[in-house]
Amino acid sequence: MGEEQRLILEMVQQRTITPDEAVKLLEALEPFALIANTAATSPRERKRGKRPARDDFFPVPHQLSHEEKEERRESWDAEAEGKWSSRWSLLSTRLGEVFESAIEKVRGLDFDLGEFHWGNVHTVEEVFSGEMDVKQLAIAIPHGTVQLRGWDDSGYRIEIRGYVKEEMEEEALRLLRKQVRFKKEERIFLELEKQRRFRAEVRAYVPRAWLEELIVVTHHGAIQLQDLDVDRLVLHSYNGNIAINKVVGQRLDATAANGKLEVTECRFQETNLSGVNSPIEAAGAFGDTSCRTVNALLHLQLAEPVEGQVFLKATNGSIRVSLPENVSLQGELAGAFGKIFNELTDIEVLGEVKEWLNHTYSFRTRETEQFHLQLMASCTNGSIYLQHHQESVGEI
């Protein structure tokens, strides 16, 4: 069996093409296989066949001259070239038609959760609810999104909507329930096993000011939090955005490897935001703050004067800091490739060094001994901007 026939059988087994299309492909490959077998036979092997007996009654054939041999060879080559080109043209046309129809069936399919021949995607739901008598909640989702919102009810409600690839809806619901792990002991723990045959959307509702610790982890999906009062908040997403709106707490730790990290109208005494290919936009009242990103922009906006230390680091991207009018601060800015812009008023420049791959800028608020803010910002490939407070966080 040739490599082409084996490939066609594998495509049928994987249900990428139908058996009828496979038959058409095999029929289209038949002349090509014959030509390949003929070409694979060497001239010496063809000459090893039994020679016909020479009839002595016939005269000796005419010996062709060199010029006649060249003319006959050119004639044979032209005839063979015409046959080959005709066969290849027909073969390429037939193969092109069959493969084009097969590609049209494969093109545009969602290989993670698409509608394949062996099963459709069914939407099934599972709900957990009860009294919120524990102070900790942890959610881990491999493929899917998490939306968590605070409400005025004293209980909790967790809705799981799964998009499962199965033949029957009953089998899809059974698979979802099999993969969901829900425990309520010292904490509420919800986890979905890593399974490529489904993804899930989790919507959770908890008392607004009750939790002491909230942990949310997603591998391929976004995280959205709103209207919460949590002492300690830990968020992590490998491939997905993280959005936090109107959340109050003591400590925030958020990491987004490949996705936007956005914090709006929040208040935390300690904030740690980090990303790799993740733009960071944070707006609110923050105390001690650390923001780090590698290949993206960073924008920090302080809504009101809060005492604390702020450390900002960007490798390939600019840094923009927006401060209110009545904040007092001292700081040091450093960069390599880029510029430093300071639009703040009542600023005293303590020192500035401009060297190759070394630009440092030290400053503080004029005629002030007590400072609200200690600012340190470092940017390798990008500029640093200091400006007064704006009404909303815009794009950098």
Image (cartoon, rainbow, N blue to C red):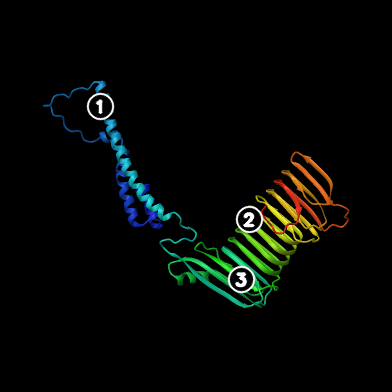
Mark 3: which amino acid?
Answer: Ala
Residue 240 location (% of width, % of height) = 60, 59
Q: Secondary structure at mark 2?
A: strand
**Residue lying at 29% horizontally and 43% vertically, measured from the top left:** 34
**Category of crowding for the residue at label 2, using alpha-carbon neighbours closer than 10 angstroms: few (below 14), some (14–19), many (at least 20):** many
Q: Secondary structure at mark 3?
A: strand
Residue 193 location (% of width, % of height) = 55, 65
When the figure is inspected, residue 345 is found, relative to residue 154, above or below; the finding is above
Q: Which residue is mark 3?
A: 204
**Category of crowding for the residue at label 1, using alpha-carbon neighbours closer than 10 angstroms: few (below 14), some (14–19), many (at least 20):** few
Q: Quadrant of residue 69?
A: top left
Residue 16 location (% of width, % of height) = 40, 56
Q: Are marks 3 and 1 in contact (CB under 8 Å)?
A: no
Q: Which residue is mark 1?
A: 72
Q: Secondary structure at mark 1?
A: helix
Q: Who is closer to the viewer here, 396 or 331?
A: 396
Q: Is residue 36 among what the camera can see?
A: no
Q: Which residue is mark 2?
A: 257
Residue 288 location (% of width, % of height) = 77, 59
Mark 2: which amino acid?
Answer: Ala
Q: Left or right? Give the position of 386 relative to 365.
A: left
As measured in the structure, the alpha-carbon distance from the residue carrying label 3 to the one carrying label 2 is 24 Å
Q: Marks 3 and 2: which is nearer the front? A: 3
